[in-house]
Amino acid sequence: MNTDKKKILVPTDFQQPATYALQHAVRVSGVVGEPIVLIHVVKSADEVEGAKQKLAKVIDETQKKYNFTPEAVVKIGEVANEIAQAAIEIDASIVIMGSASVRGRHDLTNLPTLKVITKSTVPFITIQEPPVNKRYDDIVFPIDFTVENKEKHSWISYFCDYYVSKYHLIKPNVTDPELVAKVDLNMASAVRFLDEKGAKYQVYTVPGVKPYAEEVLDLAVNIRADLIVIMTAKTSDNSDFMLEPHEQRIVGQAGHIPVMSINPR
């Protein structure tokens, strides 16, 4: 399945949120021109044939509705590992996955969705509801004090190549001098990168009255954001990735706004 062209990977368990993810992927594909690959993971070889039949039905319905034919693959094994490996095998640019389980949650620690996100070596977009807009015209970038925050910049390039987006850079309201310095450094780096790209952007500092995640989400709703981009961090032993509590809250409570989680390299 390897080609020179990047692909969009869409995991499916054949539930409604997976249908929303496919709808979203079709819209993204229409802009970036990347084909879609559906993946379903089963536990044993006995389930493969049934999964292929279900995928064939989804492909047929997608073709009839959107005049678009995705590819499909069935993998046997543990869901998070197989999705992460498939993303490498097909050279995926992004993974787009629906997840009803995250809806409204503050803490995703024990949910399978979090494990899938933190295993993926490519950016992961979580979808809870049907897509509202076709394009990423307004993108929210929360700026924090982590070193990994700078890795969002390569995705600014991606969006600049395909979308005429406006970037909303959101700073936390912190007073600790060390944290202020780190946030300002990350903000300056992002602004410099956007200036080099000639991109439109606006900088905000949240009031600091509520938790940072809630204020980011409030602002995202107010500006009718099409995407929120967050950055995971390495675990203390550098063996895996993790979402900080405020990022878990953003993923869980984003509602109709897709959230892209980027794992640092």
Image (cartoon, rainbow, N blue to C red):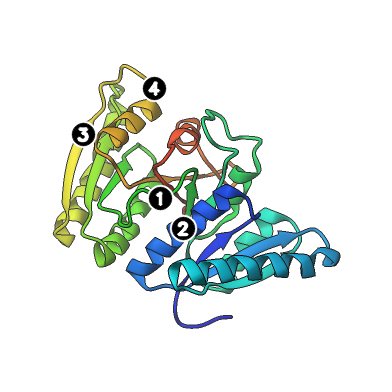
Do callouts 1 and 3 mark residues in contact (Cβ within 8 Å)?
A: no
Alpha-carbon distance for marks 2 and 4? 32 Å
Tag 3 or tag 1, which sits nearer the N-term? 1
Closer-to-camera residue (35/121) = 35
Q: Position of residue 107 (x, y in %)?
A: 56, 30
Mark nearest the camera among 1 and 3 is 1
Residue drawn at the location 45% of the way across and 31% of the way down: 246
Alpha-carbon distance for marks 3 and 2? 31 Å
In this figure, which residue is indicated by the disc labeled 4?
211
Residue drawn at the location 60% of the way across and 53% of the way down: 119
Tag 4 or tag 2, which sits nearer the N-term? 2
Mark nearest the camera among 3 and 2 is 2
Q: Is residue 25 above or below residue 143?
A: below
In this figure, which residue is indicated by the disc labeled 1?
131
Closer-to-camera residue (29/219) = 29
Residue 46 placement: quadrant: bottom right
Q: Position of residue 213 (x, y in %)?
A: 39, 29
In this figure, which residue is indicated by the disc labeled 3?
204
Mark 4 burial class by Cα count in 10 Å: few <14, some 14-19, many 20+: some
Mark nearest the camera among 2 and 4 is 2
| Three-letter code for the amino acid on which mark 2 is drawn | Gln
| Three-letter code for the amino acid on which mark 3 is drawn | Tyr
| Three-letter code for the amino acid on which mark 1 is drawn | Pro
Alpha-carbon distance for marks 4 and 1? 27 Å
Mark 1 burial class by Cα count in 10 Å: few <14, some 14-19, many 20+: some
Q: Position of residue 217 (x, y in %)?
A: 36, 32
- As drawn, which residue projects farthest toward the bottom? 3
| Three-letter code for the amino acid on which mark 4 is drawn | Pro
